[in-house]
Amino acid sequence: MPTSLLPRLLQLSAAVLLAGCASHGSEQPSDIRSEDAKAADAVLELEVTFARAPDYKPETSGPYASSHYVKIEGYPNIEIPFYQKGIGFELGVLGDPRALLALPYPSPKTDSSTNSLRVMGQRLDSTRYRFVVLPLSGWKSLNSFEVAFAHNGRREAMTFTYSTKAACDNSFAVTTPTYGFAMSVAARFPGGAQGCLKPCDARPGYPGHCAYYSGFLLVPSL
């Protein structure tokens, strides 16, 4: 390879690596209040009635505390997962990697990344909360979310999956998987459109991910 190409190749490799690193970053703060979200942006609205009043500690902090994006420690909240798939790059080497003239080069590969958004519930009274399920710009939805809360310090979560292309009864009662807390849920889709909401088994270690999908077709799992 001509030596005149070496500086250009090194610059290209560095640029590709920096671009790859930047593509995994997130400038979106993690939390938003349900009452601050625009109704037109919501994928669905969920009202949850807990049999026992959940813990309620709406303490805000962090650099976003002055805006509608905040870092809130307390319950209840929902966590919504998202994903991206695309073409990324990894660094290969031309020639013997032990040689002084070995040259790095970018090699294409299939890349995946994940993100999530936490939406804090709007307290209607001691046992009733309103949530909105929101999209995240530039990310694809897994069409699922987790409702998380605590009662006397015992943390609990229930995972749900939804579809806007199927219709079913969207008001029902559930019992949480760990402590058996009872709660009822009611979903409303924008403009009175039909939709379907179902509870699903959670995927351990992945908040808001269903372990499996059933009853209607959703996006494929990662």
Image: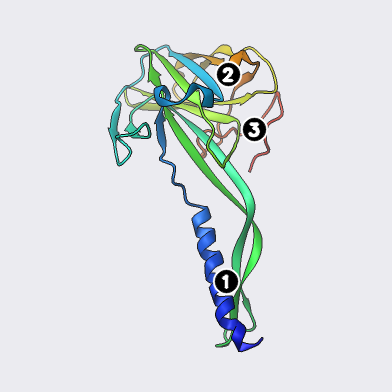
Q: Is residue 154 left or right of residue 201?
A: left
Label 3: which residue?
212
In the depicted view, which residue is nearer to us: 216 or 94?
A: 94
Label 1: which residue?
12
Q: Is residue 127 left or right of residue 65?
A: right
Determine the CA span between mark 2 and mark 3: 26 Å
Position of 85 relative to 36 (above/below):
below
Q: Mark 1 vs mark 2: which is more N-terminal?
A: 1
Residue 97 shows up from this direction: no
Labelled pair 3, 1 in contact (Cβ < 8 Å): no
Label 2: which residue?
190
If the image is split into quadrants, where does the C terminus sit? Answer: top right
* Secondary-structure class at tag 3: loop
Q: Amino acid at mark 2?
A: Pro
* Secondary-structure class at tag 1: helix
Determine the CA span between mark 1 and mark 2: 47 Å
* Label placed on residue 77: none
* Secondary-structure class at tag 2: helix
Residue appearing at x 40%, y 22% in the figure: 35
Mark 1 is surrounded, within 10 Å at the Cα level, by few (under 14), some (14 to 19) or many (20 or more) other residues, namely some
Residue appearing at x 69%, y 27% in the figure: 214
Q: x, y percentage for residue 59?
A: 28, 30
Determine the CA span between mark 3 and mark 1: 42 Å
Q: x, y percentage for residue 133?
A: 51, 26
If the image is split into quadrants, where does the N terminus sit? Answer: bottom right
Position of 88 relative to 151 (above/below):
below
Q: Mark 2 vs mark 3: which is more N-terminal?
A: 2
